[in-house]
DNA sequence: TCGCAGGTGGTCG
DNA sequence: CGACCACCTGCG
C-alpha cells in the first residue's frame, strides 16, 4: 500500500469517469480498480489533514498493490498530480459562468498521462460506439491477445496487446472481440506502427487508418501531454451549441473558440464540459 | 423495427 | 473543398 499525501483538486469519480479512460472500474466503496504500467491497482482517497471533505480540501491518495516508490515515480505522474489545477481552473472560470459551473461539477478532474498505444486503440474503438461496449471491446481485446498482468482481488488482468501481436492477426482472428468494422482499422494501424514505429505528431496520428481529427485530439490530450487539444465529439458539440451559442455543425468554429478562450488548457476545459453535460444524462 | 452511440473514409457536386 | 452516407454491433 502506497500513499500520496496532501493532494488538492483530485476526485476519483471525476477523473476516472470523465471519459478519458476505459479500463477503470468503480467499486462499491467508491474506490477505482484499474491497470496501467502492467500492474493492476486500486486507488481511493481519504480526507487529508484538514479532516473535512469540502471540494477545496486536500486529500490523501491510497494506492493498493503498488510500492511507495512506484507511487512517486509512476502513479504521481499518471494522475498528473504535479500540475496546479487550482490555478488552471481559476484561469478558465474567469469571465465564463458556464465554465465556472462545469468546474464546480467536476472539480476533481485530472488529465491522466496514459500509454500512447493503449490510447490509440481505445479511441479507435470509441468511434461511433457507446461506452459500455467500448469497455467490453477493449477488455476482450486484452483477454484474447494481451499478456497476463497478474491476478488482483480475485480477477485476472491482461495488458493491452502489443502492435506486433495485433499486426500478425487477421480480421477473422479479431471476430470474437466484436469490434465490427473497427477491426480492420486496428489491424492496419498495428501494421503501420510495426513498420514505422509510433510517431509523436498530429500528422502522424492522422495518417493512421481510422484516426481522424477527433480521435487524434484524444490521443494528443490523453497520452501526449498536449493539453491544448480540444476533441470535439457529439457531447462537446452539444455544450458548445446549447451553452455557448455556436452553430451545431460548425466544428471549426468550436475549435477556434476553444483556442481563443481556453488557450493552452483547451483539453482540460473540454473534460469539464464533457463531464458536466454527460452528468445530466446518466445513461451509463 | 429502427435509431443511436465520444467518427471516419469514400464519394459526390 | 463541403455535404452526405454507409458502417459492425448491441441496446432500448
Image (spheres, coloured by chain):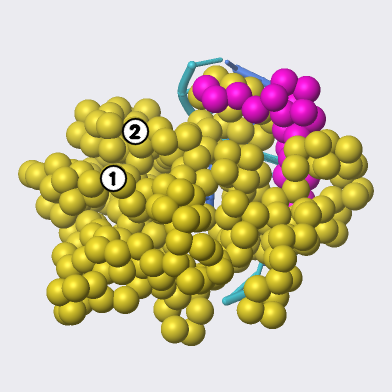
Chain colours: A yellow, B blue, C cyan
Left or right: A203, with A124 as reference point: left
Q: Nearer the viewer, residue A236 or A88?
A: A88
Residue at x 63%, y 40% (from the top left corner): A117
Q: Nearer the viewer, residue A143 or A49?
A: A49
Q: Please say if A267 is above or below A243.
A: above
Q: Nearer the viewer, residue A37 or A13?
A: A37
Front label number (1 vs 2) = 1
Parent chain of label 1: A
- Residue A42 is situated, as x and y percent measured from the top left of the image, at 51, 70
- Occupied quadrant, residue A210: top right
Q: Is residue A249 visible?
A: no
Describe the element under mark 1 as helix, strand or loop. loop
Residue at x 53%, y 64% (from the top left corner): A66
Q: Tell me where the magenta segment starts and ends, as one range.
A: A177-201
Residue at x 86%, y 54% (from the top left corner): A175
Based on the picture, tell me whether residue A191 belongs to the magenta stretch. yes
Specify few, some or many for label 2: CA neighbours under 10 Å numbering under 14, 14-19, or 20 or more: many
- Occupied quadrant, residue A65: bottom right
Lower position in the chain sequence, tag 1 or tag 2: 1
Specify few, some or many for label 1: CA neighbours under 10 Å numbering under 14, 14-19, or 20 or more: few
Residue topped by disc 1: A83
Q: How many marks?
A: 2
Q: Nearer the viewer, residue C4 or A198?
A: A198
- Residue A57 is situated, as x and y percent measured from the top left of the image, at 17, 68
Residue topped by disc 2: A228
Q: Please say if A110 is above or below A226.
A: below
Parent chain of label 2: A
Describe the element under mark 2 as helix, strand or loop. loop
Principal secondary structure, stretch drawn in magenta: helix
Amino acid at each position: 500500500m502506497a500513499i500520496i499525501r496532501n493532494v488538492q483538486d483530485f476526485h476519483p469519480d471525476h477523473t476516472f469517469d470523465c471519459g478519458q479512460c476505459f479500463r477503470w472500474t468503480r467499486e462499491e466503496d467508491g474506490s477505482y480498480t484499474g491497470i496501467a504500467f502492467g500492474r493492476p491497482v486500486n486507488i481511493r482517497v481519504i480526507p487529508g489533514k484538514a479532516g473535512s471533505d469540502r471540494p477545496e480540501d486536500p486529500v490523501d491518495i491510497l494506492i493498493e498493490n503498488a510500492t511507495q516508490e512506484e507511487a512517486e515515480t509512476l502513479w504521481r505522474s499518471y494522475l498528473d498530480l504535479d500540475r496546479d489545477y487550482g490555478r488552471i481552473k481559476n484561469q478558465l472560470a474567469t469571465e465564463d459562468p458556464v465554465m465556472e459551473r462545469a468546474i464546480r461539477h467536476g472539480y476533481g478532474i485530472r488529465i491522466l498521462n496514459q500509454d500512447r498505444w493503449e490510447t490509440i486503440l481505445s479511441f479507435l474503438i470509441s468511434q461511433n460506439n457507446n461506452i459500455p461496449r467500448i469497455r467490453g471491446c477493449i477488455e476482450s481485446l486484452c483477454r484474447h491477445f494481451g499478456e497476463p498482468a497478474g491476478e488482483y482481488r480475485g480477477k485476472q488482468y491482461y495488458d493491452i496487446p502489443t502492435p506486433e501481436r495485433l499486426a500478425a492477426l487477421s480480421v477473422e482472428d479479431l471476430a470474437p472481440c466484436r469490434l465490427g468494422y473497427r477491426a480492420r482499422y486496428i489491424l492496419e494501424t498495428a501494421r503501420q506502427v510495426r513498420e514505422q514505429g509510433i510517431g509523436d505528431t498530429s500528422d502522424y496520428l492522422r495518417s493512421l487508418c481510422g484516426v481522424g481529427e477527433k480521435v487524434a485530439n484524444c490521443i494528443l490530450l490523453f497520452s501526449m501531454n498536449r493539453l491544448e487539444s480540444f476533441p470535439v465529439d457529439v457531447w462537446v458539440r452539444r455544450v458548445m451549441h446549447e451553452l455557448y451559442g455556436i452553430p451545431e455543425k460548425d466544428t471549426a468554429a468550436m475549435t477556434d473558440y476553444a483556442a481563443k478562450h481556453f488557450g493552452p488548457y483547451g483539453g482540460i476545459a473540454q473534460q469539464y464540459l464533457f463531464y458536466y453535460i454527460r452528468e445530466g444524462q446518466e445513461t451509463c
